[in-house]
Image (cartoon, rainbow, N blue to C red):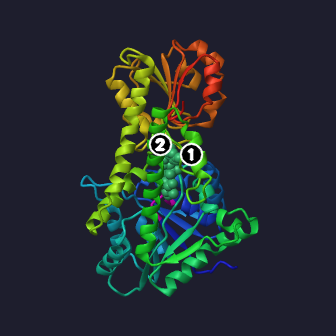
Amino acid sequence: MTISANIKIAVLGLGHVGLPTALGLAELGWPVVGADDDQAKARRIAQGEAPFYEPGMAELLQRQLGSGRFQVAGSVPDAVQQGTILFVCVGTPLGADGRVDLSQVESVARTIARNLNGYKLIVEKSTTPVRTAEQFHRTIARYSNGQHPFDVAVNPEFLREGTALQDFFHPDRVVLGVATPEARQMLLQIYQPLLERMAASGNGSAASKGSSPLMVTDLNTAELIKHSANAFLALKISFINLIADFCEATGADVTEVARGIGMDPRIGPAFLRAGAGYGGYCLPKDLKAFVRIAEEHGVDFSLLNEVGRINDARAERIVQRLRHATWVIKGKTVAVWGLAFKPHTDDVRDAPSLRIVSRLREEGASLRLHDPWAMEQFRRDFPDQPPRLVYCPSPENAAEGADALVILTEWPEYLKADLARLRESMAAPIIVDGRNLMDPAAVRALGFDYYGIGRP
Ligand code: UDX
């Protein structure tokens, strides 16, 4: 298919959603202009510097800046004026009242309204509560002079941090929430090159099963799909974490239970890893927001409050495990491997490590922290305070002289550590594995006291 000459995509907001989306669309062949209110961030991106760690992104950024298909606009209004299709990727944090704070979305709607200079399709990509697109449409109509027609569509993102580009190019599904035939047509055109790539390579998960990953719905359904998906994922994790507690009480093995139930295609094997609990910018926030918006529409979703409560309790469970292992935490030196909320990202937002490190400090432990990518981010909340809190250049260095090692992120490189040497360098050979990363039998054979999650 040929790229329509008059289409230019503007991506408004260049964070964890916006930047991979902008670069992915440019890689598909579309001319893309990106913009961010954070001028310093926009300048870094324009100079080819990725503002956060995401595998493959720095290379793709440089390639697309080089190809000229991706450019950074001087301002959001400038990008709005240049674009025919605007992808809105601004932040939707949780407000103090438990509702999603939609001020950035509302503000961008007014900026768009003031800068309409012809027909535009405005696509909401940020995760927003159901019925936000309706309000978004109303706001643009209210603040624009009515001279230029526009459409609003919803195209929720399902990108996971750490695999954002892989997810962009091989999506399980692409959900298009539209209200008009024009919006439908334009979005189908935008994603056509992606579908062709997937069909040609045959390795998109939906495409490889011979089905199209495209799904066209109305606006509210598309918004609900996104929120329901994240709520369900959180539910799966809290479910398996409770099963882990049950396994600990009965001597069963949660990894085997997960394998056994996951073989049932109605359940599926993914998101059944028990451990320190879920974190990140999306699952915790989306779950709370979902319960709140459901309540506002008269639906009691207290089921999901329990999911959140179970997750919040995971941090204390890790601390208890450490107390059980060391007898007394006060005065001990504890090494922590992994600060990011999951591997392959430097993101620590709502990471279990934040709560656990905070609790260990309260208990009077000295901490030796390591993460391959996330130490800089973590430092913002926990500055260096030697000897009570130090950041270490390697996992081995963190473990030196420690009375116990706690694993909070399952970085694959931690599996490469020489455990025999590690044991020699530690003051006491205790491992609390909050992600079930290690093989218990192998670690115990080396003389460690090993405590996993939900494993005998
Ligand atoms: C999530 C959704 O998966 C993605 O579709 C959406 O677009 C954004 O939110 P992300 O926040 O990147 O993605 O992380 P995800 O991979 O979902 O993991 C969330 C948390 O759950 C992590 O802390 C992870 O360690 C934890 N987790 C995941 C478990 O504890 N057990 C599991 O089995 C899976």
In the rendered structure, the answer to whether residue 173 lies left or right of residue 36 reads right
Q: Which residues are magenta?
A: 12-18
Q: Residues within 10 Å of mark 2 (few under 14, many from 20)?
A: many
User: Tag 2, which secondary structure?
Assistant: helix
Q: Amino acid at mark 2?
A: Ile
Q: Nearer the viewer, residue 276 or 143?
A: 276
Is 17 within the magenta?
Answer: yes
Q: Residues within 10 Å of mark 1 (few under 14, many from 20)?
A: many
Where's the N terminus, which quadrant? Answer: bottom right
Q: Amino acid at mark 1?
A: Ala
Mark 1–mark 2 distance (CA, rounded to whole Å): 9 Å
Q: Which mark is residue 168?
A: none
Q: Nearer the viewer, residue 291 or 26?
A: 291
> Residue 199 appears at what percent x and percent y?
72, 70
Q: Which mark is residue 258?
A: 1
Task: Identify residue for label 2.
Answer: 243
CB of mark 1 within 8 Å of CB of mark 2? yes
Q: Nearer the viewer, residue 274 or 190?
A: 274
Image quadrant where residue 32 sits: bottom right
Q: Is residue 294 visible?
A: yes
Extreme residue in the left direction: 97
Earlier in the chain: of badge 1 and badge 2, it is 2
Is 55 within the magenta?
Answer: no
Q: Is residue 52 visible?
A: no
> Residue 69 appears at what percent x and percent y?
62, 66
Task: Identify which residue is drawn at 44% across, 50% down.
Answer: 40
> Residue 104 appears at what percent x and percent y?
34, 62
